[in-house]
Image: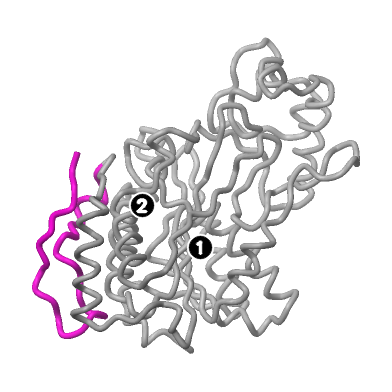
């Protein structure tokens, strides 16, 4: 188990250009890297005094950094759903750039929120929820459509109904309603993901390099660091931190889930929102889409307060072992970035000085 050391690297001319000596970019690729919070606290205290960092509550401009699903299962090759992008190094390099961005811009970032994709063993997008017509398991990366359910190609697993303590007929009817609602919305079809980010697993944890940076920020700026969980509802997907994909029951008797109104308010009240995370093609895209929806409903001009760090996110690309990809969502991520820019959001690079970002 690795821990952070207590040696400060020789600082540059200002805190905006400095990176603490304990930082090691190689830790971006280390499963289970565990920073030492006690040592980070001492170093942050010294850093605060050295550079005269003020508490974040005194910031004239409230800048909120939103880190989406920067968890071990997504960010490391040992994870069950590693987001390597086409290069195979995507999330690892993204994590290092994001951590360095935090250190270089401590005095500009008022608050950091990290979302945590959070799942239990039986959920509608896991293979445990489904079975084939012959009763055999459904494979990961399978797409299940309403037509498939109507034809009997796939069906809800009785074991899932038992585990969730839900009537099998009711659950089957809901499953068909769910796939049809997804298809009507036009954003996604039901995709069966490998088991990932299960609550209590190592893969659920925030990747150590970014936990280290967030801890340093919270101690250096006196800003609360409270992760935002999402995805625990077994009957719907939750790509976005702001709302599940389907909110309603098939029988019309109320809702199965709700929008995250509290966190929507937090983001809307910030002067600037900076977004990074995984994956650009799914949870990042959906979260920004929902932020944009909220902005358009209030004032479309507010889109200009959102900054998307395109070099701190990668798309899902699943290698097929033959030099190609079984599934590649890079195009979806690229199209989303263009759509966000067209709406007035700023697509930027973390390596560019923050003061050079347009309208920042």
- State the image coordinates of residue 325 (x, y, percent, origin top left): 43, 41
Q: Position of residue 126 (x, y in %)?
A: 59, 30
Q: Quadrant of the rendered structure where residue 193 is?
A: top right
The stretch drawn in magenta includes residue 305: no
Asked whether residue 21 is drawn in magenta, I would say yes
Secondary structure of residue under mark 2 = helix
Give the side of residue 161 with respect to residue 59, left or right: right
Q: Position of residue 60 (x, y in %)?
A: 47, 88
**Which is nearer the eye, 24 or 140?**
24
Disc 2 from disc 1: Cα separation: 16 Å
Which one is closest to the eye, mark 2 or mark 1?
2
Instruction: Identify which residue is drawn at 33% across, 56% down.
Output: 210
* Residues rendered magenta in the picture: 1-30
Where is mark 2, residue-wise? 91
106 up-or-down from 321: above or below: below
- Closer to the camera in the image, 321 or 206: 206
Q: Name the main secondary structure of what is drawn in magenta.
A: loop
Which quadrant of the rendered structure holds the N terminus? Answer: top left
Q: Which residue is mark 1?
A: 334
Q: Would you call the spot at circle 2 few (<14 residues within 10 Å), some (14-19), or many (20 or more)?
A: many
């Amino acid at each position: 188990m690795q821990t952070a050391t207590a040696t400060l690297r020789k600082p540059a001319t200002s805190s905006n250009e400095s990176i603490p000596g304990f930082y090691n970019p190689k830790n971006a690729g280390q499963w289970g890297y565990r920073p030492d919070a006690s040592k980070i606290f001492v170093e942050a205290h010294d850093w605060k005094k050295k550079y005269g960092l003020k508490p974040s509550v005194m910031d004239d401009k409230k800048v909120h950094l939103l880190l989406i699903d920067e968890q071990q299962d997504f960010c490391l090759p040992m994870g069950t759903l590693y987001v390597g992008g086409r290069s195979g190094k995507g999330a690892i390099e993204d994590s290092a750039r994001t951590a360095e961005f935090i250190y270089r811009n401590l005095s500009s970032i008022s608050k950091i929120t990290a979302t945590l994709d959070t799942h239990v063993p039986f959920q509608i997008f896991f293979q445990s929820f489904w079975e084939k017509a012959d009763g055999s398991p459904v494979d990961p990366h399978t797409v299940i459509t309403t037509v498939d359910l109507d034809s009997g190609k796939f069906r809800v697993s009785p074991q899932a109904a038992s585990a969730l303590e839900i009537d099998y007929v009711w659950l089957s009817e809901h499953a068909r309603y769910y796939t049809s609602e997804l298809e009507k919305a036009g954003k996604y079809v039901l995709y069966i993901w490998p088991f990932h980010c299960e609550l209590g697993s190592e893969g659920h944890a925030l990747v150590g390099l970014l936990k280290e940076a967030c801890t340093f920020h919270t101690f250096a700026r006196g800003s609360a660091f409270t992760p935002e969980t999402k995805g625990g509802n077994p009957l719907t997907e939750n790509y976005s931190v702001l709302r599940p994909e389907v909110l309603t029951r098939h029988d019309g008797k109320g809702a199965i889930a709700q929008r995250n109104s509290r966190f929507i308010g937090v983001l809307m009240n910030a002067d600037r929102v900076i977004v990074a995370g995984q994956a650009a093609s799914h949870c990042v895209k959906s979260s920004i889409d929902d932020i944009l929806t909220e902005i358009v409903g209030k004032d479309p001009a507010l889109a200009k307060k959102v900054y998307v760090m395109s070099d701190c996110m990668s798309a899902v690309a699943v290698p097929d072992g033959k030099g190609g990809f079984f599934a590649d969502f890079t195009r979806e991520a690229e199209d989303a970035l263009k759509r966000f820019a067209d709406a007035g959001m700023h697509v930027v690079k973390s390596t560019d000085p923050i003061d050079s970002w347009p309208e920042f």
